[in-house]
Image (tube, helix red, strand yellow):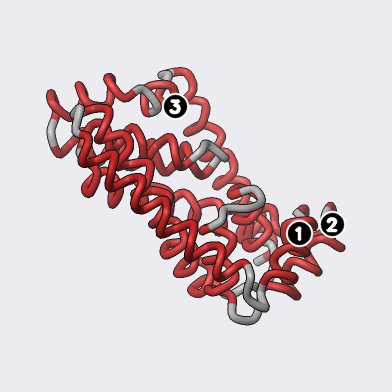
Amino acid sequence: MAKRKRFYKTLLIVCLLLLLTFATQQGLFEHVTDSNWVAQMIDENGVMALWGLLFVGALFTAVGGPRQMIAFVFGFALGGALGGLLSTVAALIGCVFAFYFARLTIRSTLQRRFSRKLYKFELLIVERTWLKVLLIRLLPVGSNLLTNLFAGATHVPARGFIFGSFIGYLPQMFIFSFAGAGVGLSDHNQLVVSIGLFIVSSVIGAYLYRSRLRKQVDELVEEE
């Protein structure tokens, strides 16, 4: 049983490395951050391009690429609303991928390397997980990639972590998506929506940050 488990872990890591190598060699990460290239791909290939871009965008964020860039590019190519929704889905898939990659493959390695930090991380976030993750994503503070990996290496409940990440991702993704749409479509209304969302998001983030969760989240970020 243990040998089979190690085999599957090794296989998963090899597949990931091959996938990342392919994406890098094909310049997919560079393309997915190029607004004009993405817009052209969608114009020429329609729905099939959307599925491909969603996958590459998820992989890009899974390895630490800035999700805000994906939101801007998708907004530029697809408009604020659709771009914001698809970029959020891409970021969430990337989050889930990194979370389960850590949980299924490198969990023990992370626990040995970051035992004290992981202990404090789990202690702070294991209760009311979705709310604390929401606050981390909303501000945002800390590293998106480290948060995903650390959560996967602990006993933090997956459902609460993923739900909090999804809700927390939404404001920033739509802010950058509408900003990208405003640039791509030369539409000042899209930029106004982006600014309005930024203000609302800042107010909500400030309120939550000043709540009794502030000290806990500050400690959590310092540990990262």
Contact check, label 1 and label 2, Cβ < 8 Å: yes
Residue 170 placed where, x, y %?
39, 57
Residue drawn 43% across the image and 35% down it: 69
Q: Secondary structure at mark 2?
A: helix
User: Where is residue 28 drawn, in percent x and y?
Assistant: 40, 24
Crowd rating for badge 3 (residues with CA inside 10 Å; few <14, some 14–19, many 20+): some
Give the residue drawn at x 44%, y 56%: 169
Task: Decide if residue 154 is on the left or right side of residue 157.
Answer: right
Residue type at the position of mark 2: Arg
Relative to 175, is 136 above or below? below
The image shows residue 97 at horizontal and vertical percentages of 49, 52
| Residue for badge 2 | 112
- Label 2 Cα crowd, 10 Å radius (few <14 / some 14-19 / many 20+): few
Q: Is residue 127 above or below residue 2?
A: below
**Picture mark count:** 3
Quarter of the view holding residue 190 = top left
Residue assigned mark 3: 29
> Is 7 in front, or is 160?
160
Residue occupying image coordinates x 59% and y 43%: 13
Residue 45, by quadrant, is: top left
Classify residue 11 as left or right of residue 85: right
Instruction: Tell me the SS state at disc 1.
Output: helix
Q: Which residue is mark 1?
A: 108
